[in-house]
Image (tube, helix red, strand yellow):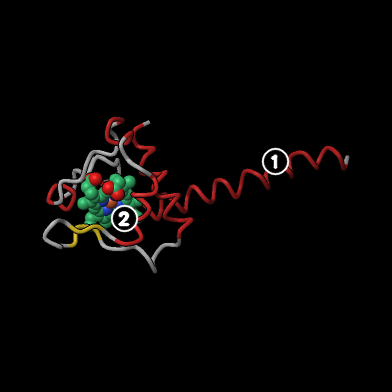
């Protein structure tokens, strides 16, 4: 009897944290990113259009994204040439692991 229980219990302990982490990443995306990039990553929001954000569901766009640059942009924010802030820094709101997960999440719209 005991051994019959071990496998499902083990399976559950592996599945639950992975599922929970996914949920957190989606919630963070909705909260911090969707206002500009849109729920679907296409950037067709009022803010997204104003800032002309690229379509993150386009494979060609995503192929050009460098993870370290995207991460730096989340940490430090993005300014245009005249120094106007396009994207504010998320430092203090999200930690590095959360930012990395969000970059991966944003890139996954193109799949
Ligand atoms: C205030 C609007 C705004 C918000 C909020 C925002 N972004 Fe961006 N994002 C931009 C702009 C502007 C760019 C630069 C133009 C482009 O590449 O689309 C950009 C670019 C990107 C890129 C392409 C790589 C790069 O850095 O240039 C990724 C990936 C990205 N954002 C992910 C995110 C994630 C993840 C979040 C949430 C933590 C987020 N963005 C929140 C406006 C925003």
Residue 104 or 35: which is nearer the viewer?
Answer: 104
Of the numbered discs in the image, which one, if any, rests on residue 73?
Answer: 2
Q: Tell me the quarter of the picture where residue 91 sits.
A: bottom left
Quadrant housing the N terminus: top right
How far is disc 2 from disc 1 in space, using C-alphas? 37 Å
**Mark 1 residue's CB less than 8 Å from ligand 1:** no
Badge 2: residue crowd in 10 Å (few <14, some 14–19, many ≥20)? some
Q: Which percent across, then down, holds residue 75?
A: 36, 60
Quadrant housing the C terminus: top left
Badge 1: residue crowd in 10 Å (few <14, some 14–19, many ≥20)? few
Q: Which percent across, then down, holds residue 15?
A: 62, 43
Element type at marker 1? helix
Q: Which percent across, then down, holds residue 2?
A: 87, 43
Q: Which percent across, then down, holds residue 73?
A: 31, 55
Of the numbered discs in the image, which one, if any, rests on residue 11?
Answer: 1
Query: Residue furthest toward the right?
Result: 1
Say left or right for 34 vs 4: left
Q: Nearer the viewer, mark 2 or mark 1?
A: 2
Q: Tell me the quarter of the picture where residue 14 sits.
A: top right
**Mark 2 residue's CB less than 8 Å from ligand 1:** yes
The residue that appears at 15% across and 51% down in the rendered structure is: 51
The residue that appears at 68% across and 47% down in the rendered structure is: 13
| Residue 35 in sight in this render | no
Say left or right for 70 vs 18: left
């Amino acid at each position: 009897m005991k051994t019959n229980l071990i496998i499902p219990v083990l399976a559950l302990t592996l599945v639950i944290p992975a599922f929970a982490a996914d949920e957190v990443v989606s919630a963070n995306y909705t909260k911090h990113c969707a206002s500009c990039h849109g729920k679907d990553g296409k950037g067709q929001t009022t803010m997204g259009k104003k800032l002309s954000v690229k379509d993150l569901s386009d494979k060609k766009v995503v192929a050009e994204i460098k993870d370290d640059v995207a991460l730096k942009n989340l940490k430090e924010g993005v300014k245009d040439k005249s120094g106007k802030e396009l994207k504010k820094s998320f430092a203090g709101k999200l930690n590095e692991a959360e930012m990395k997960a969000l970059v991966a999440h944003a890139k996954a719209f193109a799949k």
